[in-house]
Image (cartoon, rainbow, N blue to C red):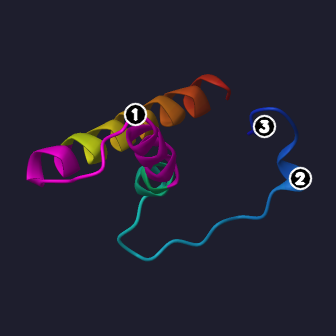
Amino acid sequence: MMALGGSDENYEPITFASEMTLRDYFAGKALPVIMKDWYDEGFECFDDNNEEWLASCAYKMADSMMKARENND
């Protein structure tokens, strides 16, 4: 499989905790970017609904990354 933007030979494999999936990893990488945009728009407080929405956005982004990964094979 070729990595987006180049050869896989430049990338080290990632070892996950037994319960973590690649989708979880991608969501975790997307979340800080989504939260930065959230703060940049002037939102500073979190409640249960906001936290669920932010997590949902992160997993939607992760799903898009997984799809791009599949389409690149």
Q: Tell how many labels.
A: 3
CA distance separating discs 3 and 2: 9 Å
Q: Is residue 25 left or right of residue 14?
A: left
Viewer-side residue, 7 vs 53: 53
- The label on residue 2 is 3
Above or below, 56 against 16 in this view is above
Instruction: Work out how far the residue at label 1 is from the one at label 3, CA to CA, in angstroms.
Output: 36 Å
Q: Amino acid at mark 2?
A: Glu
Classify mark 3: residues with Cα within 10 Å, few (<14), some (14-19) or many (20+).
few
59 or 50, nearer to the observer: 50
Q: Residues within 10 Å of mark 2 (few under 14, many from 20)?
A: few
- 2 sits to left or right of 54: right
Q: Residue 26: image x %, image y %? A: 50, 49
For mark 2, give the secondary structure. helix
Write down the residue under mark 2. Answer: 9
Q: Looking at the image, is mark 1 or mark 3 earlier in the sequence?
A: 3
Figure check: 73 above or below 39? above
Q: Which residue is mark 1?
A: 41
Helix, strand or loop at label 1? It is: loop
The spot of residue 50 in percent (x, y) is 18, 45
**Disc ID at residue 52:** none
Please give the range of residues in magenta: 29-52
Left or right of residue 1, residue 48 in this image: left
User: SS at mark 3?
Assistant: loop
Q: Residue 40: within the magenta?
A: yes
Q: Which residue is more in the foreground, 27 or 73? A: 27
Residue 2 in the image: x percent, y percent? 78, 37
